Structure formats: C-alpha cells, structure tokens
Image: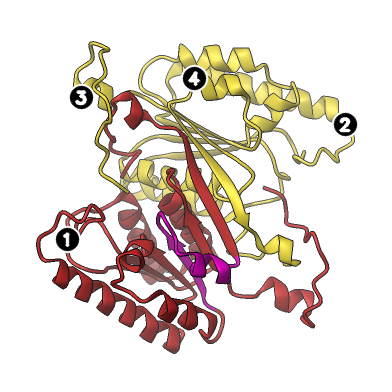
Chain colours: A yellow, B red
Amino acid sequence: MPKGQPLVDPQDGLTTRQRRNRPLVIVNTGDGKGKSTAAFGLALRAWNQGWDIGVFQFVKSAKWRIGEQTVLERLGALHEETGEGGPVEWNKMGFGWSWTRKSESEDDHAAAAAEGWAEIKRRLAQERHDLYVLDEFTYPIQWGWVDVDDVVTTLLTRPGHQHVVVTGRRVDPRLVEIADLVTDMHQVKHPFEQGQKGQRGIEW
Amino acid sequence: MPKGQPLVDPQDGLTTRQRRNRPLVIVNTGDGKGKSTAAFGLALRAWNQGWDIGVFQFVKSAKWRIGEQTVLERLGALHEETGEGGPVEWNKMGFGWSWTRKSESEDDHAAAAAEGWAEIKRRLAQERHDLYVLDEFTYPIQWGWVDVDDVVTTLLTRPGHQHVVVTGRRVDPRLVEIADLVTDMHQVKHPFEQGQKGQRGIEW
C-alpha cells in the first residue's frame, strides 16, 4: 500500500495535521468476501494504537461466534491485564436473526435492530469509542428497520474524533455520499461456485 | 456473511468433508483498500483455530512496521506463553525496497525477492505453516523478479493442507486461474482524492 500522498491540494482552510486526523466514515461493500474481515483487520491497527473499539454486529445468529470476536475480545482482555493496546467491546445487536430473513418474528428483529442503532447513537453522542465497527449494518437499513436519513445525520454531526466503519452489501447511496472511504469488494472467483462449503478458519 | 451453501453439486468424487477442508489459494487484488487488511483479518481467524501462520511481507520499508505486525506477533507470543491460538512468524522479504521502485539497487532487490520466494518454496515443501500470507507478492511477480510459472506450479503441487493468501494489485492471470477464491477490492471513494494523507490507526 502506498504511504498516501494526496492527489489534490484541498482548499478547505485546514492544516495538514487537522486534515490528516479527520475522523472517517468508511464503508466496505460489494458482493465479494473481505468486507467484515477488512473491518476487523482495521480494528487490529486501532487496538495497536490504543484506541477504544466498539464492535456492533448486526447479523448472524447469536450463537454464531466468529474467530475475530474471540481474538478481539482476547486483545481487549490483554489491555485490561497489561495496558497494551486498547479496550474492545463486542456487541451483538438483535437476537439470532440472519440476513437471509428466514426468521419468523420479523417485528421483534426490527425492534432489536432499531434499539441497537439507538444505543450506537447514544454512544456517539457520549464519544464513547474511537472506532465503531457496524458490521453488516447495511441490512437493517435496507429493510427499513433503521432510517438511513437518521444514520446520515447522526454520522455527519457526530462530535469529537470517532471513526465509523460500516460493512455489508447493497449500501444505501446516501451513505456512500457522506462516506470518506468506500471500497467495493467484488467476487471474481469463489469456491462456493465450485460446490465447496465454507470451512473453519477461513469463513469463521 | 452467509454460512456458505454451495451453488452447484460438484462431480469430483470427493466427500463433502474432503471438499470442505480442501486447502485454498486466495487472492485479494484490485486498486482499492482492504487487500492486506482482509488477509490479516483472515490470519486472526486462523490464529483462533490454532493454525501455524507465516507472514511474508514483500514490500514496504524494513523500518515500516504496520500495526498488524505488532498485534499478530503479540498473538504469537501469547501462544508461546499460554498455548492459546497458534504460532505466528512474520518475515520481511527484501530489505527496504518499495513498490514505487524508487530504490537505486534494483538488482539487489530482485535477488532478495527471489530468495524470499525460494524460502517460501522450501517451507511449502516442508509443510511448515498452515496459513501463508504472501503480502504484496504480486509486485515481484509483475516485475519479473519471481517467475509466475514457478509460483503456479509450486502452489498447485504443494503437499498436505496449506492455505496460501496472496495480496497486491495487478495479479497475473495465471495466478487467478489456479486460485480458489479471488476478490477484487475496488476503490469507490478515497480520502486521498480529497487531499487527505494517510493517518495512524487507519492506514498502518
């Protein structure tokens, strides 16, 4: 990766230092793999900087524990024990609903997602974390469980210096518009197409 | 992310279990961010499974220490101390050369890259690691420092159960052809375009 030279000279009245440290809204979207994985990789860097990390996982079954959760929570415990890195809090929003929407009680799931977003709003107002990973947050937005205009306004007006990463397919264009960095992960070739199921250590 | 249902029923004579556990060649390419970050996120999962992880970083200055290195090496040390997770070895191949090719002694860098690849070949033959991260390995291939046919043959004939992840832009089509999983990270929007430099915790 290049060390990051700007391509244009912005006329925004900010110093380079101010601009460099501007808090970011980052979106990882697309039909390919790596959206969440890259977000959790970013959390590694953040931990190493001593940042306070809040993960808000908006899908997958509550019993579905991905490897990243175990490791990031272990790193958070290491911070408690030794002061290395930063604290990590992992939150599962909703309760066992999945993006395939096969669940029965959709109303409950919608309410749980809305409450999850309300909690994130409270924390942003309190400047609780340095990095927020809103994993698979595009789905509750897409399904109308969370109002995208509210998300956009909240992110644009968030106080202090809080980075926010959103992952998921089919991101709303209004979120793209206000994001600082948007990456589309495109699937070129995938073993599922060749009849292979996901495997431990690779998929979770 | 879906739990991974195959789209077709393969006629390859393998059981589901054999197929599920087939070792993978994974390529993260494209002009966007997240190629390396997703690879290191995958290493988190691998560590959690107790896999032996070898990282081979093919670019960036030798003094350039990214956050992922600190954290993954810390996780490797944790494995030594407590038995949690798996061992991690982080190798910097070459010595201070960068993908911008601004360095003076290109011959030295080519030789260092070739020797780095030779070391990886030896380890694959010995089945030394469970997961190999060949970070930014597309560049020495692109520049002719490492022979792509040798890479393809080595990967196709590697023994045992070794997963290999390759990252970098402009991947050679022959590598795509033999890969099991290829993701193109496409840059939709990037703060560098808006005159912002990279920042600590986000870029490294």
State the residue position of label 2: A105
Alpha carbon of mark 1 to alpha carbon of mark 2: how far?
Answer: 57 Å
Query: Which quadrant of the structure image shows residue A163?
Result: top left
State the residue position of label 4: A178
Report whether B19 appears left or right of B64: right
Query: Which quadrant of the structure image shows residue A29?
Result: top right
State the residue position of label 1: B96
State the residue position of label 3: A17
Pointer 2 with pointer 4, Cβ within 8 A: no
Mark 1 residue crowding within 10 angstroms, few (<14) / some (14–19) / many (20+)? some
Circle 4: residue type: Ile
Alpha carbon of mark 3 to alpha carbon of mark 2: how far?
Answer: 49 Å
Residue B127: x %, y % from top left: 46, 85
* Residue A120 visible to an observer of this rendering: yes
The residue at 66%/33% (across/down) is A170
Parent chain of label 1: B
Circle 3: residue type: Arg
Parent chain of label 2: A
Report whether B22 appears left or right of A48: right
